Amino acid sequence: DAKTTQPPSMDCAEGRAANLPCNHSTISGNEYVYWYRQIHSQGPQYIIHGLKNNETNEMASLIITEDRKSSTLILPHATLRDTAVYYCIVFPQPSNTGKLIFGQGTTLQVKP
Amino acid sequence: NAGVTQTPKFQVLKTGQSMTLQCAQDMNHEYMSWYRQDPGMGLRLIHYSVGAGITDQGEVPNGYNVSRSTTEDFPLRLLSAAPSQTSVYFCASSYTPWQPQHFGDGTRLSIL
């Protein structure tokens, strides 16, 4: 019962910015937008999260629209090691269960 | 920097056998959880714990037991393995249920 919609796959050229969209039109006021990724055969890795303001860290930037119904994860200079499945997750704070609802995600293929 | 350590990495069982999947973290996280990931599907929450001595059921708890006697360890027990439990199992931890979670690299379990 994922509350987000993502394109199933995207390609990106190495060195270019990768922009991964996510739709979360039913997001509630206390729900944050989280992004995780899963590189093949590894556990999910946390990337970034935000409520309503744009966020940036050493890995990526997160742009959330003013109405909070959609967001974009930006990897500024994609490398081959960024090839992975990217999951956009809406997650309430606080949460009693910590349950992350992983949908199908977007498979990002970074090409040389 | 060990993070979340899962053992074993691979295991093959026969139907009806029992085993324990180990999960340990060295970050003094109070919250720990177990997920399973079946082919082509997202992760589903099995059990979680908000601290030593406290556990609760997630989305798919049937066939699995957990206990949390220490902050560091959160083992997952299969009492009588069934082929439907063939999956990749991931353990995760965080300071609180709503903070970013750190995942282990998984245990790949096959039940014949």
Image: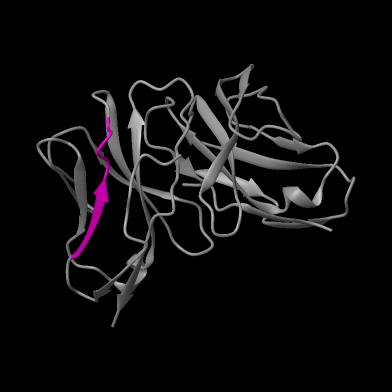
Closest to the observer, B101 or A30: A30
The residue positioned 51% from the left and 50% from the top of the image is: B42
What secondary structure predominates along the stretch shown in magenta? strand
Quadrant in the picture for residue A9: bottom left
Q: Give the extent of the magenta segment.
A: A18-27
Closest to the observer, B69 or A24: A24
Where residue B47 sits: x, y (%)? 61, 30
The residue positioned 60% from the left and 19% from the top of the image is: B52
Q: Does the rendering let one see residue A57?
A: no
In the visual, does A77 lie left or right of B13?
left
Where residue B79 sits: x, y (%)? 83, 36
Q: Does the rendering let one see residue A92?
A: yes
| B92 vs B111: above or below | above
In the visual, does A51 lie left or right of B18?
left
Where residue A106 sits: x, y (%)? 36, 59
Where residue B53 sits: x, y (%)? 64, 16
